[in-house]
Image: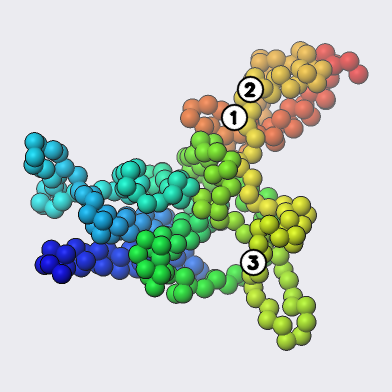
Amino acid sequence: MTKRNRKVGSVKTELLTKSREAMLTAVQIFNNPNIQFKSESYIVLSIIAWTYLLHAYFKGNKIEYRYYEQHGQRKKFDKTKRGAYKFWELERCLNDASCPVDNVAKSNLKFLIGLRHEIEHQMTTRIDNYLSARFQACCLNFNESIKTLFDEKLGIDKHLSFSLQFSTLKEEHVNQLKEFTDLPKHISSFINGFDSDISDEEYNDMRYSYRVLYIPKSANHKGQADKVIEFLPANSPEAEKLNKEYVLIKEKEKPKYLPSKIIQIMQEDGFVKFKQHQHTQLWKLKDAKNINKGFGVLVAKTWYWYDAWLKEVKGHCKANAVAYGKNT
């Protein structure tokens, strides 16, 4: 082996070592009940982990991952004020044609990158429970990638176990997790906007957001092993039955309506005098665009109403049926 090849191998090994360490640290921090800064720490560390992972891949495959300008046959590499090379950030790695990450896993990472942009300049809270499914997918995708691209022995799954919980998931918790009303406005707007831009197929792919259903279960027979989590094949009769009988937290963000659609629905229902002016007066009276009320969301400078507001409007129109021209 040449001196250059030994150096490449050494750099790649160091990158992989730090990559695994960053991801393991991210997961351990997220699972630590004494730490409040979970999501923010996980996002930053997991992005570093993936960046080093892809740098190791590019290094091993002799793909240039430093920024440079081409001057004839020469490459002039971009450097910091201290003289260090400027290496590709994660998003640049993902956008490169030689990137080995599949499109769904890329979407998961680009979601985390976008979320990091939202939280790095201002403090945020209460996002752990809402986004844990995407963090889980990121972790599983990393584990699969490092084993597939490099070596099975590099997997981090053998170092981790399921974290124990002190709380159960009740119906009211499920409903809360499906709402984004408790999130800071800029975070909920980012999540809604990002999810709206991807296909339903991609959104429901486990590589984008890994969701599981927990059901309390006891062993059927004495002496039988009783695992906390039991995995069922997605196409099994048992899994299909669960999908039918239980509400899974897997829906895309609630249906959204433009004001014109709300008015159209009400007029089709017979309230022909309920128009734009009346609708505007109503939402102002109810302070319905207060994000904490959960009636709608601002996406890309456009306000959309949720079903909760449509229900509110229907109740208002029924209570004032005569005024709105409804023949009772």
- Find disc 1 in the rendering and name its residue: 304
Residue at mark 1 to residue at mark 2: CA–CA distance: 7 Å
- At x 51% / y 50%, what residue is drawn? 208
Mark 2, other Cα within 10 Å: few <14 / some 14–19 / many ≥20: some
Task: Kindly indicate whether the residue at mark 3 contacts the one at mark 1 (C-beta within 8 angstroms).
Answer: no
Residue drawn where x is 19% and y is 63% of the image: 8
Task: Kindly identify the amino acid type of the residue bearing the numbered disc 2.
Answer: Pro
Ranked by sequence position, the earlier of labels 1 and 2 is: 2
* 257 displayed left or right of 81: right
Q: Which residue lies furthest to the bottom in this view?
A: 223
Q: What secondary structure is marked by label 2?
A: helix
Crowding near the residue tagged with mark 3, few <14, some 14–19, many ≥20 C-alpha atoms within 10 Å: few
Position of 59 relative to 280 (above/below) = below
Comparing labels 3 and 2, the label whose residue is closer to the camera: 3
Q: Residue furthest front?
A: 1
Numbered circle sitting on residue 259: 2
In the displayed structure image, the side of residue 110 where residue 243 appears, left or right = right
- Quarter of the picture holding the C terminus: top right
Q: Nearer the viewer, mark 1 or mark 3?
A: 3
Q: Which of 71 and 67 is in front in this view?
A: 71
Circle 3 residue:
231
Residue 18 rendering spot, x and y as whole percentages: 30, 66
Crowding at mark 1 (Cα within 10 Å: few <14, some 14-19, many 20+) = some
Report the amino acid beneath label 1.
Tyr
Which kind of residue does numbered mark 3 sit on?
A: Phe
